[in-house]
Amino acid sequence: MLNTNRGQDPEFTMPTYNTDITNEDKEPIRREDWHFRAVVRDLSDNAGASLLNYARSKDNILSLAQGEGSLTTPDFIIDAAAKAMKDGYTKYGPVLGQPVLRQEIANYYVKHYNINLPTNRIYVTGSGTTAMHLALTAVLNEGDEVVAVTPIWKNLLGAVEIAQGIIKDVPLEDRDGDWHLDLDKLFDAVTPKTQALLIVSPSNPTGWVLPAEDVQRVLEFARARDLWIISDEVYTRTTFDTDRAPSFLDYADEDDKLFVVNSFSKLWAMTGWRMGWLIGPAKAESIIRDIAIYDNMGPCTFSQFACVEALRHGEDFVAQQRDMWRENRDYVLKRFEGNNRIHMNVPKSTFYGFLRIDGVDDCVSFCRELIDEENLSLSPGIAFGKSCKGYLRICYGVDRKVLDEALDRLERFVNK
Ligand SMILES: Cc1ncc(COP(=O)(O)O)c(C=O)c1O
């Protein structure tokens, strides 16, 4: 039986179906004893995934570690998938997506971004993560450098590694109660080996947003240096004080070397559906099709009809969820105001907070002890970049009761 009470019950136990099966704890497998592709064998440590697995091996763990909200997919979206299955959409489909969904995504950009995109620039993918892999596979040669603004969601760095790229990170600066990107540092990190700039705005884990003027400057720089921009815009519509964050699509021409990654996961509470999309220059269509054929022969057919409904009728849900996240963000900030050891810049978007705790400089040990002593699971900052050893990420997109209990446990542990 699947446990569906996530978000309602402070004593929530991570469902066992969600646990990766591993025998790491019993009998460590030495990767070097076998032949595996070197790049995979030597992948950089994924402290966040290891800690999640550690937490999931225990009972009664409360988690703010996973990047998903507590609301479940709205019924009208689920019903659309069921109907599509009954209507026979259970077979292979077009590799770059059903025409009706590609068109609906185009409509979505007209409605919410005031941007006209032809459908030959829109590629439906089996998740935002897959969209990122397709883009990186399309542009990287072995040893190409990717300049990435960090902290950044670890999976994107992993995707660069798997594509045999080399990451050069440019950390945001945490000063004066906010996150700042020094564009000169970003530009200085570019070398003749750089193939792409990788930017996630709004950012997982900080909620930082790249301002519109900087979007334009980065675009001009990339044009001048003939670089690709890979822009992860999964959280563009999760901003709290504006309707949405600036997008590279606001300023780019259709021939710019730009890939934009997006996802159905967060806005429509569809993390388990594994649906996303990629936008590229029209010239990329046949390249992306070639890669997608060999990758997975295209996204799930019937899920795409659910995505059409999400785009057509999901706005009330999107607004309701965003209100809940905003209220929770304000609640977290208020709680931390009363704790002079915990510091968190105001997230301008997303459902994440990136915290610093006085005296904590080893986030992995901190997270482990928090699991052991308080049954609370958070993400270690190091998972988002090597400059983030002293940070922790919380996901506050959860039910208030769960959030409240989690913050009680965190504060009790910190104040010990
Ligand atoms: C910045 C960012 N990009 C992409 C994704 C992945 O989205 P999907 O669930 O569609 O793979 C996430 C998920 O947490 C994310 O935070």
Image (cartoon, rainbow, N blue to C red):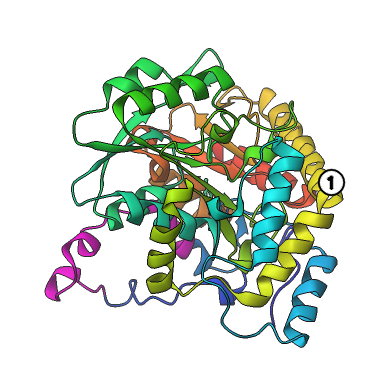
Query: Vertical placement of 272 versus 69: above or below?
Result: below
Magenta stretch bounds: 28-54
Please provide percent x and percent y for residue 329.
Answer: 71, 35
The image quadrant that residue 381 belongs to is: top left
Q: Position of residue 97 (x, y in %)?
A: 58, 66
Q: Which residue is mark 1?
A: 320
Q: How many marks?
A: 1
Taking the image as shown, residue 195 lies to the left or right of residue 220, namely left
Circle 1 packing at 10 Å, graded few (<14), some (14-19), many (20+), is few
Residue at 45 percent across and 74 percent down: it is 296
Residue 392, how many percent across, how many down? 50, 39
Residue 46 in sight in this render = no
Residue occupying image coordinates x 53% and y 12%: 176
30 lies above or below 141: below
Q: Nearer the viewer, residue 416 or 238?
A: 238
Q: Can you tell which quarter of the image residue 314 is in?
A: bottom right
Q: Nearer the viewer, residue 372 or 349?
A: 349
Looking at the picture, does residue 86 appear above or below residue 356?
below
Q: Is residue 119 visible?
A: yes
Asked if residue 50 lies in the magenta stretch, the reply is yes
Q: Is disc 1 placed on a helix, strand or loop?
A: helix
**What amino acid is labelled 1 in the image?**
Gln
Residue 184 point in image, percent of width and height: 35, 15
Tell me if 1 is positioned left or right of 23 in this view: right
Residue 367 shown left or right of residue 343 in the figure: left
Q: Is residue 355 above or below residue 181?
A: below
Q: Is residue 335 one of those drawn in magenta?
A: no
Which residue lies at the image location 76% right of the left edge and 55% below the top edge? 311
